[in-house]
Image: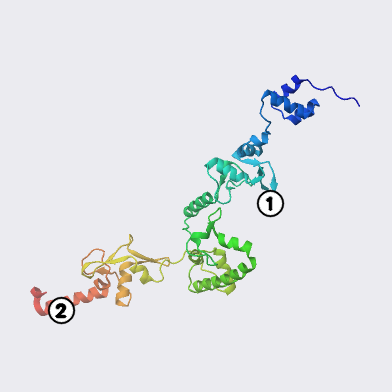
Amino acid sequence: MSRPVNATRADIVALLSDGHSNSRIARELRVDKHRVRRIREELGLPSYVPVEQTRTLEDKWRLYARPSDGGHLEWTGERVGAAGSPVLRYKDQAYSPAAIAFEMRHGRPAQGYAIAECGRARCVAPDHVDDEAGRQAKRREIRQASGRGALEGVCLYGHDRATHGRLERDGRPYCEACKRELKTEPEAHREVRTGAQAAMRQSIAVLLRQNIPQMQIAKQLGIAPATVQRTRQALGLPAPRAGRRDRYSSLEEAFHANTEPGDDGHLRWTCSTPSVCFRQQRVPAARVSFELYRGRPPVGPVTSACGVSGCVAGEHLTDQPMRAANKRADKVFGAIFGKAAA
């Protein structure tokens, strides 16, 4: 086999000037690698550094972040695990592409996991990625906008919600401590969970037997309405009455809720309408007050005898028989003592 003709010095210098490595030049020109190195040193050229070593972490990230529709960025690089989680290897270390995207956008490392909140799985667009703090802040806004308050008290297993409470994308709460314990100690957590569930069912049963609405129980205990419904069905309790719940437990409570005391024993009606609304009925406030005070329904119209407009004090109200009796008494009094005395 004939040996190839050795390359000239000019050929080697040309490739060195183009920035190629000694090994590549020796391979392409079929020359001794040591000769290429000597010429490099004679020319005072720096040692060859692979592009991979000069590329920054962000530069390498951009190589694998491919633009997609809707402003998303799809990760085309390496994926690991059964879930196919994106990973970027750089200088013998593995990085999360989403965490890199977050730091590029915010100028600081992510706190906790960095995940895209745009709804596109594995999106690594910097504008779509949030860390734990950012996610929870946005989810708290969603929860407040839907009329649900801040997380308070403890979870079913006794963890402080102010410390361990987290929110799902739709604002539903969950406990980070419970989630962590379930992974590390599933058996112990299962025992605690069983006891906590029994205690919760007992609390639900007590409130159900007090005829408290299911939605109110769920809000009070911080649980899903479906949990209350399942407990009610398991206890064999009747289904809740359909329709709007009563605001007041009695007609008397509804009456007093819309009054305030005045001077000289007067009682002022504060509602914009002159009627007491209770269980889809409207009863004039004066008639309700009269019956509550006298212990009997009024006969005929009820009027105020005190002369104060809007007064509904029971002792100041009269019905038709009372007014007729007063007139008869006035006549008798006048007949006995004369008109001047009357």
For disc 1, the marked residue is: 83
Task: Name the residue nearer the viewer: 281 or 212.
Answer: 212
Q: Is residue 7 above or below residue 260?
A: above
Image coordinates of residue 314 in percent, x first then y, are: 27, 72
- The mark total stands at 2
Find residue 312 and report its image quarter: bottom left
Indicate which label's residue lies in the foreground, 1 or 2. Answer: 1
Circles 1 and 2, Cβ within 8 Å, touching? The answer is no
Which quarter of the image is occupied by the N terminus? top right
Find residue 310 and report its image quarter: bottom left
Q: Residues within 10 Å of mark 2 (few under 14, many from 20)?
A: few
Q: CA distance from mark 1 to mark 2?
A: 100 Å
**Considering the numbered disc 1 on the image, is that residue within a helix, a strand or a loop?**
loop
User: Does residue 223 appear to the left or right of 273 in the view shown?
Assistant: right
- Residue type for callout 2: Val
Residue 332's disc number: 2
Residue placed furthest toward the left = 340
Residue at 20%, 75% (x, y): give it.
326
Q: Is residue 285 visible?
A: yes
Residue at 50%, 54% (x, y): give it.
143
Residue placed furthest toward the bottom = 336
Task: Name the residue nearer the viewer: 177 or 22.
Answer: 22
Q: Is residue 112 above or below residue 54?
A: below
Residue at 56%, 44% (x, y): give it.
102
Along the polypeptide, which appears first: circle 1 or circle 2? 1
- Residue type for callout 1: Ala
Find residue 78 and report its image quarter: top right
**Considering the numbered disc 2 on the image, is that residue within a helix, a strand or a loop?**
helix
